[in-house]
Amino acid sequence: MTEETRRAGAASQALSVLLAPALLGFTLLAFAPGAAAQTAPPAGAAPAGEAAPRVALSGRFGDRALIVVNGRAHTVAVGDTVEGVRLLGWRDDAAQLQVGTQRLSLRVGGAPVDLTRAAPDAGLADGPSRVVLQADAGGHFTGSGSINGRSTRFMVDTGATLVALSQAEADRLGIAFRDAARGTANTANGEVPVHRVVLQTVRLGGVEVPRVEAVILPAALPHVLLGNNFLERFTMQREDGRMTLQRRP
């Protein structure tokens, strides 16, 4: 193992503690300017103040479903409930879900369902619809792309709620974040100060997504992290060290 690979692995482990706190019983949520992020509700409870969640099915692993609820990804077993969404089982390739008294049938590749609106807006620009990423030596899926037209490197992080990048990378990309909304995020390492911005474009491979919310972190990160507010626009399939992201219709 080279020294560069060792450092990248250590940085990725630190990242998991910082940006995937759901693994430790916490969830990274959206931030209000100057206020700390709220702790997540217990598993099985609907988020406070939300009448109904926005739900998408992003993948299937055996009988488990990768369900994205309000931008947060969960791997759910049959019979389990997360954020008020219960996985009842499978009918062919469609997940059978229950939200309160309502039942949903979602397929991988279908558009997210917002129970408070008739039709969600996918928010994707026209153009190519498929990206294939290769796993690196550490098992992370990385790829090249751009933010606001400037090239960068990305890493898929299904444990992060939002796209995240370091202050150093934001400076390199010319993102004016210092006057942006400030907030704090609760993570396993305690409160972390952040800035919240809207990126005009995020392009991964040949697929471009306009107006993507992101947080700027003081910590050094080896890549820009693609959180669930970007990933929920795609379906994900993993096979033989490759991840295929297919744009939702």
Image: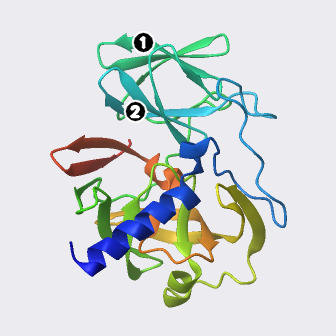
Residue at 42% across, 64% down:
12
Alpha carbon separation for disc pair 2 and 1: 17 Å
Secondary structure type for disc 1: strand
- Residue 102 found in image quarter: top right
Decide which of 122, 74 is in the foreground and name it: 74
Residue 238 picture location, percent across and down: 25, 43
User: Mark 2 Cα within 10 Å, few/some/many (few <14, many 20+)?
Assistant: some
- Residue 126 found in image quarter: bottom left
Decide which of 6, 244 is in the foreground and name it: 6
Residue 242 picture location, percent across and down: 20, 51
- The kind of residue on which mark 2 rests is Gly
Q: Which mark is residue 89?
A: 1
- The kind of residue on which mark 1 rests is Gly
Check the picture and name the quadrant holding the N terminus: bottom left
Asked whether residue 145 appears in the rendered view, the answer is no
Residue at 63% across, 77% down:
218
Secondary structure type for disc 2: loop
Task: Residue under label 2, please give it.
Answer: 110
* Of the image marks 2 and 1, the number of the one nearer the N terminus: 1
Residue at 25% across, 49% down:
244
Direction left: furthest residue: 240
Check the picture and name the quadrant holding the C terminus: top left
